[in-house]
Amino acid sequence: MIIALAGNPNSGKTTLFNNLTGGSQYVGNWPGVTVEKKDGKLKGHPDVTIQDLPGIYSLSPYSLEEVVARQYLVNEKPDAIINIIDGTNIERNLYLTTQLLELEIPMILAINMIDLVRKNGDQINVKKLENDLGCKVIEMSALKGENALEVAEAAIQMVQEHTGIPQNPHVFTGSVEHALAHIEESIEPIVGSKGLRWFAVKVFERDERAIREMGLSKEILDHVESHIRDCEKELDDDAESIITSQRYDYIAKVMLECVKKKRARGELSVSDKIDKIVTNRILGLPIFFAIMWFVYYVSVSTLGTWMTDWTNDVLFGEIIPPAVSTFCESVGMAGWLESLIVDGIIGGVGTVLGFVPQILLIFLFLAILEDCGYMARIAFVLGRIFRRFGLSGKSFIPILISTGCGVPGIMGTRTIENEKDRRMTIMLTTFIPCSAKTEIIAMITTEFFPGNVWVAWSMWVLSFLVIIFSGIALKKTKLFAGETAPFVMELPAYHFPSGKNVALRVWDRGKHFIVKAGTIIFSIVVIVWFLESFSWSLQLLDPETQLDQSILASIGGALAWIFAPLGFGSWQGTVAIITAEMAKETATSTVVMLAGKAGITSLFTPIAALSFMAMNLFDPPCIAAMSACMREMGDRKWGWIAIGYQFMLGYCLSLVIYQMGSWLFYGAAFGFGQIVAIVIIVAALYFIFRPVPQKQINTQTAEA
Amino acid sequence: MPLTYAEMNKLYTVKRVTGKDEVRAHLATLGFVEGSQVKVIQSIDGNLIVDIKGVRVALDESLARRVLV
């Protein structure tokens, strides 16, 4: 038995899903978190599958996620639907409900967030609502767990007893109802009686996709067309708008009968007052940047550093390695095996784990900002700037998700309707530091710039600037030129962050990190250790003196010239850049392993460390994100364009940082490298500030 | 007049949403239909946060211009 959860974005479907299945899907306080359908077994009912669908405003598909939900509901027909609606906002949510009712699938209306409704002092007459809509209504609170299981059990009961098929409410009136009845009569022999009203409405709206799927003949269409035209003439509007406004008229009537709101319309709520400040024209951006500074200040520079210092220097420095060494020696373990365990695995994996406290702190802050509803506002604040370079504010959501991991961030671009915008966002979204890249920032900052409260934050700012300026430059090229998609997004109400949600979010990330440390990073560490410890003739090398003869040194050495202009043309730096392409965390473990006892400050000068960090942050993301990029682009060519662009950008940026930095701040002489850096800067400025090429203006008007 | 010119914190009634495309249909599902009450909560260069049917919706200037109140 399959029960589908359908409802508006941010109405609490995923919270209910987790509640029912015991799962821990990520729940976000903004629309568009669930972009794919997910299923799970109902707790205690192994034969019942709960299907979580992306949030939709209507069954007329607008963005990709709405297509997913509609295809599922209309074509695959679940056994029952639980329609979750946000009780604080019934009117808008009922719009989808009126459409779902027409499908004639057993359905329960679950009024979610009933605790908030009560707190607001609003009253909902459930019995009356059931009567009006012709389907069962249950009040619940997914967050508090109130009535959640009851809703599922009621749905199961319906399916078992073959009841619960909604009685079509009288949504449409007058000539529209008349025309729909006519259409129903004509198409019933073809589409059958189940969900007849839904099909009739689609024919009335002239929905091309639905009509094609029904396979209606031209005769029938011509026959009903006259009825549709009559309605349009009588009501002086197009068919689609007629349907929409009659639905809203119907809902308004239902609202009047069933819902009593306490707060008078027009009064400012607390959410509105907060919005006045944080989305303020002048203060909005500075507030956002200040908040992020604070996040990095606490997570990387102060509290996080103390915690990381302890794990790195004490736990993985003074406690574990000597203890393990003593143990290895006491059991008479071979020297190479001890070296693998202590220098390789504990040194390498330990480095990655050592920075976990800093990463978790950043995630804790971000989770709080997301969960309370603040981050969704930033989409609006930044939307203004994003628009100027031709990306819609919607692009911000994937970028935000990418602060955790680029892979779901890239998937999150599915909410962007415009194909060109979507491609550009896929290409740029991984520039924002993800958890693994944050680890690199944490390491470089802690090791090379201790006590500096600006470096970590400015890397974050730099990544923002890179995204914005890349956007401006790319939009002017032939590949991405075009109209910017309009931006419209629902803003969730502010609420106090839920401890459970925040913890779930942080745990989800932390778990991901630790699992990675145990699998891919572990394997890379072992490989690096092997290649570092043996020469080509498979002779075990002395780590103090003979590392230069290792396999790794010769591979790295052969490629080191590529990175010499960036300031870290050593084989160690080269190897770290290459391993980081497997997983960015390994940039840290590799340099720590290769530096050995001398410590990583022996490998880089501070400015080279900065350049090394920039290269890792802005060159193509890890292999997982690159393959997600290939997949979502839907075209290899576009995938390679993205990866090529990222490599070029990372390389150029690092070169500029190193060459200009060492000349301006570290007293290097002005030479060839600086000339190249200046050429790069000038070229970048040209691509950012050149006027939009005339040819594209012409094609744009032609397209319009 | 277009919603972009509306005063902040004042209730207006939507008269019409111009244009004939899927964006208009999407706006309709968000509640921007004739007769809806709408209030502008924040306005930055024509980009708006509005309250419509009890929900806060952010929309950019190109869309706000198409909502006539």
Image: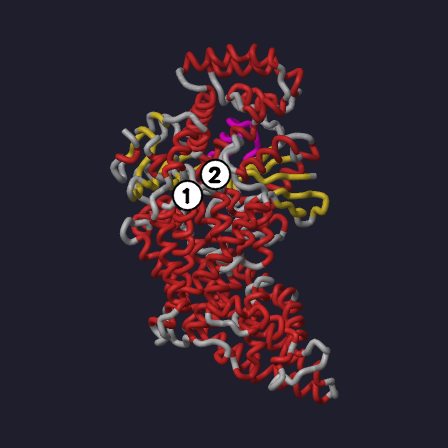
Q: Mark 2 lies on which chain?
A: A
Judged by its main secondary structure, the magenta piece is helix
Residue A91 in sight in this render = no
| Horizontal and vertical percent position of residue A145 | 55, 50
Which residue is nearer to you in this view: A556 or A371? A556
- Please tell me whether mark 1 sits on a helix, a strand or a loop: loop
Q: Is residue A155 left or right of residue A55?
A: right
Q: Is residue A332 above or below residue A452?
A: below
In which quadrant is the C terminus of chain A drawn? top left
| Horizontal and vertical percent position of residue A316 | 57, 79
What is the number of the mark on residue A418? 2
- Please tell me whether mark 2 sits on a helix, a strand or a loop: loop
Residues flagged by tags 2 and 1 on a common chain: yes
Who's the residue at 36% across and 39% down the image?
Answer: B60
Residue A9 in sight in this render = yes
Q: Is residue A621 above or below residue A478?
A: below
What is the number of the mark on residue A392? 1
Q: Do the residues labelled 2 and 1 touch (CB within 8 Å)?
A: yes
In which quadrant is the N terminus of chain A drawn? top right
Amino acid type of the residue that numbered disc 2 sits on in the rendered structure: Asn
Q: How far apart are marks 2 and 1 (CA)?
A: 9 Å
Q: Look at the image and give the residue range highlighted in magenta.
A: A125-137
Q: Earlier in the sequence, mark 2 or mark 1?
A: 1
Residue A129 in magenta?
A: yes
